[in-house]
Amino acid sequence: MRLHWLPFVAVILLTFVLDAVLLRKAWKTGKASFKALGIINAVVSVLVLAAVIYSFVSMPSTKQEFVAHMAIGARILLAYFVINVPKWLWGIFYGIGSIKGMRSDVATILKAAGTFIAAVSLFAILQGTFFTPYKVAVTEVPVSFKSLPQAFDGYRIVHISDAHLGTFGSDTTFVASCVNTINGLHPDAVCFTGDLVSMTAEEAKPFVSVLSRIKAKDGVFTILGNHDYAHYMPMLNDQQKEADLNELCELQRSMGWRLLDNESAIVRRGNDSIAIVGTANYGDPPFPVFGDYGKATQGLDGVFKVHMQHNPYMWRSALVGKADAPLTLSGHTHAMQFVLHLAGTRMSPSSWRYSEWGGLYMEGSQALYVNTGLGMVGPPFRIGVPPEITVITLKKAP
């Protein structure tokens, strides 16, 4: 997860400005109780903000300490949002309603709206913390292609992504329920599009026996995501990161999953066949590009391809209109774990960075599906975007 400093600094400034305004207004009332509330609010806000900053700038020296430190930091960041987001929303509406010359009836409506929206935001954050992350949504997506061999009409692929197993510690309950759901869908193939872990291979060990229970007629196929390379462990040197990656790859193979690292597998139905293609992570700048579609599809001219790539950035930047890639399955974005559903539309801050951040996208005869993941990274919440298991049903277009 790359830290964008400009929004981070803007949020810090917003916090200080709003707290200063609230403290000033509380002081001007002359009431001791209001003054006390203003001081308590400012002190709590500053302490939580200081804890957030410390958690991101301090650097433990060992792998175990760093993993624990980041987990605590994510929860402190969540506390920061719980305390401040409702306050920011209330403050914006209250501030507009307090503008000099504002009609009294309009000011009353704005201030009431601010209180209501602040309450709704607090409810949404709490629901997204304690309930939504554990309520899986199964999404059925039929996709039609003229080039699909007739024998694969109705072929069912269960697409899962971004497990981030460190989310769940050593508790296998949620992952086991996901496995049961997947098996109950009776897939022809299961495609996992990367980020099995958040930090290191150690996260995956408690889940090996559970994940090895996933069954599909043609097997479970997997690729690597950006987190699987141990890039986010600054205390590890290149050799240690490579060793960790190799350990993670072996753990996946021990589960019976077939790892496709710039390679492909052929699936047959009678005389017809398709290829499941897996490319290594294709990082958007400044992350490294490991994915090589040309290498992965060598010798597959004319074969229908289901392409697995963790980062949807590769689709538009390297595949659209340039390669024989009818269907790409990706993950990576999590929709930034926040989706606002309003008047039949979906809005997510993830769209500020990715043109394709969640769901099905079409460009001519090419399709991309971005799965919003099972686990979490950063603040442990999912607001408006539950964990997703996708059933991609291939259809033969006339």
Image (cartoon, rainbow, N blue to C red):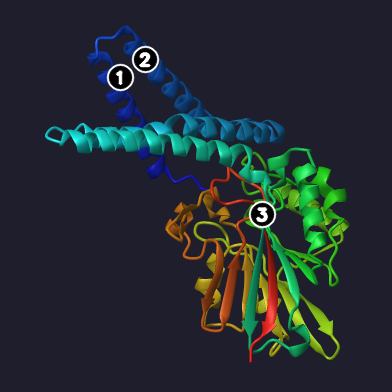
Residue name at image x 70 percent, y 48 percent: 197
Kind of residue at badge 2: Ile
Crowd tier of the residue under label 3, counting other residues whose Cα lies within 10 Å: few below 14, some 14–19, many 20 or above: many
Q: Which residue does the numbered mark 2 point to in the structure image? A: 39
- Earlier in the chain: of badge 3 and badge 2, it is 2
- Between circles 3 and 1, the one closer to the viewer is 1
Crowd tier of the residue under label 2, counting other residues whose Cα lies within 10 Å: few below 14, some 14–19, many 20 or above: some
Query: Disc count in the image?
Result: 3
Residue name at image x 48 percent, y 35 percent: 122
Give the CA separation, mark 3 to mark 1.
42 Å
Q: In the drawing, what numbered circle is on residue 23?
A: 1
Whole-percent x and y of residue 249? 79, 56
Q: Is residue 100 above or below residue 350?
A: above
**Residue 267 in sight here:** yes
Residue name at image x 80 percent, y 54 percent: 179
Task: Check disc 1 and report its element: helix, strand or loop.
Answer: helix
Residue name at image x 54 percent, y 34 percent: 78
Q: Is residue 84 above or below residue 206?
A: above
Whole-percent x and y of residue 375? 66, 48
Q: Which residue does the numbered mark 3 point to in the structure image? A: 162
Asked if the residue under mark 1 is in contact with the one under mark 2, i.e. CB atoms within 8 Å, the reply is yes
Kind of residue at badge 3: Asp
